[in-house]
Amino acid sequence: MNIGNQCWVFWGIFLYISVCLGVDYDLDDRTGLGRSFDGIGALSGGGATSRLLVNYAEPYRSQILDYLFKPKFGASLQILKVEIGGDAQTTGLPWAFPGWVGNGENWPYSFPDITASYVVSWILGAKQYHDLDIDYVGIWNERHFNNKYIKLLRYTLDKRGLERVKIIASDNLWEPITSVVIADKELQDAVEILGVHYPGTNTVPKALKTGKKLWSSEDYSTFNDNVGGGCWARILNQNYVNGKMTATISWNLVSSYYDDLPFGRDGLMTANEPWSGNYVVESPIWITAHTTQFTEPGWVYLQTVGHFTHGGSYVALTDERGNLTIITETMTHDHSVCIRPPLPPYNVTAQNVTFHLKGTFASVSELQVWHSKFDFKTNKTVLFQNLRPIKVIEGSFSIELDVDEVYTFTTVRNGQRGSYPDPPSSAPFPKSYKDDFDVSGNPYFSEAPNFADQTGVFEYFTNLTDPGPHVSTLRQVVTQRPVTWVADADQTISVIGDYKWHDLMVSCDIYMEAVHTGGVFIAVRVDKGGGVIRSTRGIFFWVYADGTYKVTNDLSGMTVLAEGLSGTRARVWYKLTLTVKGNYASADLNGYPLWKNAVLWEPRHGWVAIGTSSFELAQFDNFAIEALA
């Protein structure tokens, strides 16, 4: 990079002005190229982060997907990372594993052949049942890796004809995986990519020495307002400038989960109201487009990338066939803070820059220009605006860069700011809601709309043993505690509704399948979910197969508000009704009062929920909510 800096300072009685004629930056491929670009992507957590997306009616679901994936339309994402479900809190690659994989232990490596077979079977099933080609597979999200398991996974993939599927390790920190790969030749051959989470745009020298591809395989995880957009703009450039990472993957793809669950609105866009059809195309979508609409995986970074003298960064990529794309960002510190890691202080000021195109690009005469400007003062933010092309004169062009801007200068001419008519207006969850779980035939989706499982798995079930009104039900199907990533509850629970609800009536038919040990609940004012589900409070109405009932103020059942005999037993259908008004709660069993006026103080509001007292089979039917306030 050739830098020339010429500034004059003028003094007056009341005036101080500094004028900079600009700083020069060479973009040149004559000395060779940098690393190959692998893409920008995002992570769909399936039953967690994308839970509500599947319940959107058309055309809105397809519109959302177009903003995320359709080429030359919106984010034009190039990588999709998905979870390998494990019957537990899980949002990408293996976060958890079914209990049988651990053979009763909360550890997936005691029987590495079983774990490898499970993962490989999932990859084969993705192709067989969904025609999905999985290109890369991880180990265990942000947890310990095991050398023997990684090698065995590589062997099992090859044995099953999946040589093309590459291994990423270890979806955690740079160390110890980097040092272990260097020291172990067989492991080095097994691992294709070193993938890290939230690297803060930096790598370690050892990682560069391995010669492996380096990915930020999980990043962002930041509230998707304009500061979140600024965070995304900064790390998309600087992950390569500082860390030579050739792919960046956002957690998460789309915020399609209830706002008050942990990490609300931490997706590239927001789509969490399938009942209304409303969704919001947030700023990170258009920041992504600055890179993805004008590059493709397989393009190559120039070696001449870096930081601007007065703050910000620039990268340049080529398809090695004459096309050139330059992305600049000048995000200030306070307007680009990500959720993690801490961001050291730095300064960015307005500046003039001149790019000199050399080598293959010396003959370029014009570049298309796309511009985003975050305005935190007057809220007149402009996102992904197509400006007039800029002329390149004798291989050079100049631009004035203000703070908090993103520019793309490119020879690619077919970029587009795609759009659809505005979606329906936002609306709260319906106050009157019913679901009888009656679905004809074999439903495409196995989960009931709007229920968000926090522990356990609740699926549609055809009850062939019931000739009466309960042929189609919702069934909790996990019977063994999974190998967990976080401290999942000892009970199963699925939440639904509006977190702001406080006075309401909930009813549901329930059926316990576990003789003597079975237990089922309905609940209101449920105040927590996600990784803190064990500490969830609310008003929980339990009935048990041993003929008793209990009312508790928490999911763990430690704070008892009322208890007594219910006469309930397994393999009989019962109708539970729970009513809460102000500081009082009451409940009916089959229409008869079981208890009333239990006194409660906290929590004051929360979701509705259903669940079981352990990992056991149980069924639910004719679910209904009437929210009073």
Image: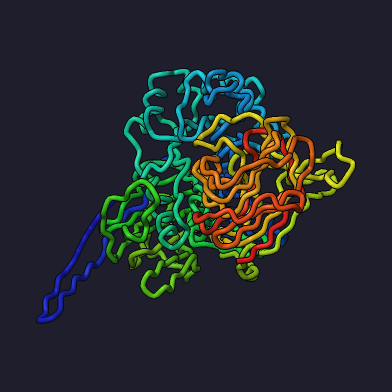
Quarter of the image with the C terminus is bottom right
Residue at 48% x, 51% y: name it.
263
State the image coordinates of residue 614 (x, y, percent, origin top left): 62, 34
- The image quarter containing residue 194 is top left
Residue, far right:
467
Residue at 45% x, 27% y: name it.
144
Colouring style: rainbow
- In the figure, 330 relative to 50: above or below? below
Residue at 45% x, 66% y: name it.
371
* Nearer the observer, 449 or 464: 464
* Residue 46 visible in the picture: no
State the image coordinates of residue 264 (x, y, percent, origin top left): 50, 54
State the image coordinates of residue 116 (x, y, percent, origin top left): 59, 23
* Nearer the observer, 255 or 35: 255
- In the figure, 15 relative to 19: above or below? below
* Residue 169 visible in the picture: yes
- The image quarter containing residue 83 is top right
Q: Is residue 595 left or right of residue 207?
A: right
Residue, far bottom:
13
State the image coordinates of residue 99 (x, y, percent, origin top left): 61, 27
Residue at 50% x, 36% y: name it.
487
- In the figure, 25 relative to 402: above or below? above
